[in-house]
Amino acid sequence: MDNILFTARLMFITHDEIENINKDSSIAYLKALYQCQDSIAVDYTQNTLLTNNIATKNLGYKDDFVNIFILDKESLTTEYLDARKALYKSIMQIKEERQGEYEREQKRIHNLSYEEYERELKEIEREQRQARFNRKDKSKDSNHLILESNDKSIKIIFLDKIDSNQSSNVSSLREVGTTSWQSTTNISLSNLIHLHDNKIDIFTKNGSEIDIESLMNKYHLDTNILHSPNTQIFLYSHLLNGSKEIESHPLYFGELDNDGVFVESKPIYYLQGNEDLSSADSNTMNCHADKSARNDKNISTSTLQVFLHSSTLTILHYSLIHSSLHIKLECNSSESQEIEDKEKALLESKAKDSKENKESISTAFLCPVLEDNELKCPHNGRVQLKSKKGKSFQSQGIPMILESDLMNSSIVGCTHTIAGVPTPCSLVSVILPSARALKRYNDDYPIMQDNALSFG
């Protein structure tokens, strides 16, 4: 044994060897593919040292790699292996780009004088302190590792959140592009999104949560691609294509065995319809909330849970009509048809309203200007807001501003000049009709937040 260890060495893997990997390949090559490593351990005869037993013993049977490539090996498909090969290729490209940048930077630093080096070092330390300070103000949702190629054609979003103790490690990973993240963080290679070649591959595991709205709004993923065959989503190695609804089990999609029991070795889908909140009373709307949060109330989508063995994946804002993430569910019950009809009705209603009156639909869900809001003239002068006729309509105790309240309101701090002569705006003299709400309150029009700049 000692002799074997003494003669063991690392052998680099070629691109062709990665491309030729299949489900029956050596476990050492499969592990290199999964973990995006460019070498494997071999003995003096160039035989791989890693075996199934060693991998299971060292990693544990709950490990994602062991689960996929050893315990559930028979479920490995060409689609999954091709997706892993594409990820491997992207990781290696980013690593090479970062390594090249690192080498060029080291060469540049080597040519600096001592004084120049000291100045740069102090500046780097200052930027790092500022970065640590800024991170305290960021939401926890921003703590994700994202790797991107120089030409922006490749992006890898790791969905596991990084805690504050690992933030410095994440920063270095972004800069250097190293693939040894598992030794420094808890990032899983089965919980990520890979964007490449106008395709999206999503890898998930037990406990993963995919929010489709977040993918579009936060990460700006293309909606058309998300709903097309160019998107693949895997739960471990299983490609999620969807299924037919089981007539005896409404809202469940999958297969039953001869005894009428769910086949748990294949994905089982459970659809949960979300309530359509678009008809909520506008008087109860919180006008201090984010506009994006208010608009979310007009989306009728569903939550889709996927079960496989003892694992669960949750997909938020799933659309039956669009077959989000290319998961196609075939409805066979009145319950699922009701969810689909509700989603279809809302989409048709919004499309009709938009076609008939784009201005009306754009202002239908806005909130009025409140007394504690800040309005400015085009030259950064601040409007002094005081509610009079709008006092009876309030949001969190703050009265709204009606058109007559805003008209002739004083403006302070305007910096407008003509030919160098100060000519500041002193009061609001004109309010355009587009700034008004659609309905009157107390015989006057509220002024809407999103259109409040339509005055002069």
Image (cartoon, helix red, strand yellow):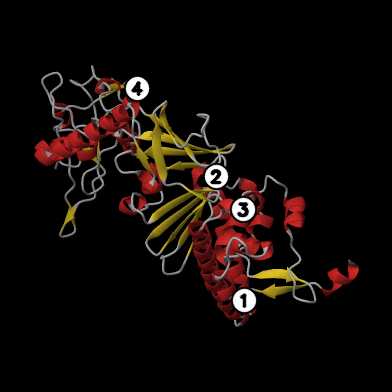
Give the numbered dot on residue 115: 1
Mark closer to the chain start, 4 or 2:
2
* Labels 3 and 1 touching (C-beta < 8 A): no
SS at mark 1?
helix
The residue beneath circle 3 is 73
The residue beneath circle 4 is 396
The three-letter code of the residue at mark 1 reads: Glu
Q: Residue at x 39, y 59 (%)?
A: 199
* Labels 3 and 2 touching (C-beta < 8 A): no
Mark closer to the chain start, 3 or 1:
3
Q: Residue at x 49, y 64 (%)?
A: 86
The residue beneath circle 2 is 136
- Circle nearer the viewer, 3 or 2: 3
Residue count near mark 1 (Cα–Cα under 10 Å), binned few <14, some 14–19, many ≥20: few
Location of residue 120 by image quarter: bottom right
Alpha-carbon distance for marks 3 and 2? 43 Å
* Labels 4 and 2 touching (C-beta < 8 A): no
